[in-house]
């Protein structure tokens, strides 16, 4: 039996927290105005009397010069983000977004020199997977995201060199540079992949740069499949099928492959703030999906979205 007085007693900590959040958000209004910027990037400008209310309703959209659209659910600057408390961020999805650069000018203001970049953030806003159509042609099909809001890369750092002729050389060295992600195609097939920019080496100019990066195996060599087979541990073959354990059609399943693959990405620079060193824009990358430790051919996954970093 349960004491009815215990059921009716409110949780004091939860009750006080609810009152605190309710009073902080009460009576706040926001106004959303859409404007078009000179660099052909549409943004949603949000004027809010309370920042926590702004975080839950603001929106920003961006497009590349090739009319490739990417959108972000929320738009806040780095300083605004640093001014928030844990409770203001919790449950809003803001932790999965990248800051935006509101002030500053175009990429031409970026002067020559050897920079160090940090707080490199990459926020995907669209995932498409290459599929073959009935007529034999291929196209990138839309997908449904199956992963929770944990797929943004952040806190990456490295070298950013700008030559006197405007050339750019970018090398990524460290940070949260991979995130396991799964999307679902229209037919129900799920495509897992390791979204990453690991060891990115990009070249170009102050307006656009791109290059290749390493795509590590979705699973490690110690992962065991349902039959106990792995790359560095486990059985060598399916012990339940001793007569066919070394059959040719089972070689890919038996011999696990954890070799890294390659991906490529292009970054367009939309804005640079010379005062703060903030730089941001839009990106597009194409990388292989999971191979199930070498047992199946990878699919090409195209990711588009927003990026942000600080130069020092």
Image: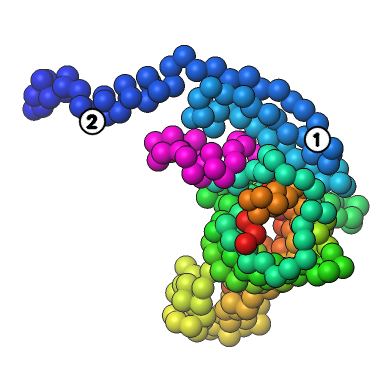
The image position of residue 274, as x and y in percent, is 70, 52
Image mark for residue 298: none
* Residue denoted by label 2: 13
Q: Which segment is the magenta one?
A: 70-95
Q: Answer whether residue 37 is magenta in the image.
A: no
* Real-space CA distance between mark 1 and mark 2, rounded to the nearest whole angstrom: 46 Å
Q: Residue at the location (57% across, 52% down)?
A: 151
Pick the residue in front: 23 or 211: 23
Q: Which of the 4 image quadrants contains residue 257?
A: bottom right
Helix, strand or loop status at disc 1: loop
Q: Is residue 282 visible?
A: no
Q: Residues within 10 Å of mark 1 (few under 14, many from 20)?
A: few
Residue 34 percent across, percent down from the top left: 74, 25
Q: To which residue does mark 1 refer?
A: 37
Q: Residue at x 54, y 17 (%)?
A: 29
Residue 40 shows up from this direction: yes
- Quadrant of residue 41 within the rendered picture: top right
Q: Which image quadrant: the C terminus?
A: bottom right
Q: Position of residue 268 (x, y in %)?
A: 79, 53
């Amino acid at each position: 039996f349960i004491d009815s007085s215990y059921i009716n007693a409110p949780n004091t900590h939860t009750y006080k927290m609810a009152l605190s959040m309710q009073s902080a958000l009460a009576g706040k209004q926001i106004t959303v105005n859409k404007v078009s910027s000179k660099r052909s990037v549409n943004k949603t400008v949000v004027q809010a009397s309370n920042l926590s209310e702004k975080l839950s309703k603001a929106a920003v959209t961006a497009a590349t010069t090739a009319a490739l659209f990417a959108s972000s659910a929320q738009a806040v600057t780095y300083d605004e983000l640093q001014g928030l408390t844990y409770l203001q961020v919790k449950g809003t999805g803001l932790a999965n977004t990248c800051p935006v650069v509101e002030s500053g000018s175009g990429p031409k203001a970026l002067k020559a020199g050897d920079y160090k970049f940090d707080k490199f953030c990459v926020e995907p806003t669209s995932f498409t997977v290459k599929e073959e159509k009935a007529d034999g042609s291929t196209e990138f099909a839309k997908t449904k995201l199956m992963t929770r809001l944990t797929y943004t890369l952040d806190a990456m750092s490295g070298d950013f060199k700008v030559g006197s002729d405007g050339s750019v050389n970018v090398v990524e060295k460290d940070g949260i540079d991979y995130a396991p992600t799964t999307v679902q195609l229209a037919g129900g097939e799920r495509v897992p992949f390791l979204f990453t920019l690991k060891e990115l080496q990009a070249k170009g100019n102050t307006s656009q740069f791109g290059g290749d990066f390493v795509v590590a195996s979705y699973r490690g060599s110690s992962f065991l499949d349902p039959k106990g087979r792995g790359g560095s541990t486990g059985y060598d073959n399916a012990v339940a099928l001793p007569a066919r354990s070394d059959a040719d059609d089972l070689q890919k399943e038996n011999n696990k492959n954890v070799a890294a693959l390659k991906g490529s990405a292009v970054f367009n620079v939309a804005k640079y703030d010379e005062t703060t060193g903030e730089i941001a824009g839009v990106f597009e990358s194409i990388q292989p999906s999971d191979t199930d430790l070498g047992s199946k051919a990878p699919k090409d996954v195209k990711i588009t979205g927003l990026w942000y970093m600080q130069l020092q």
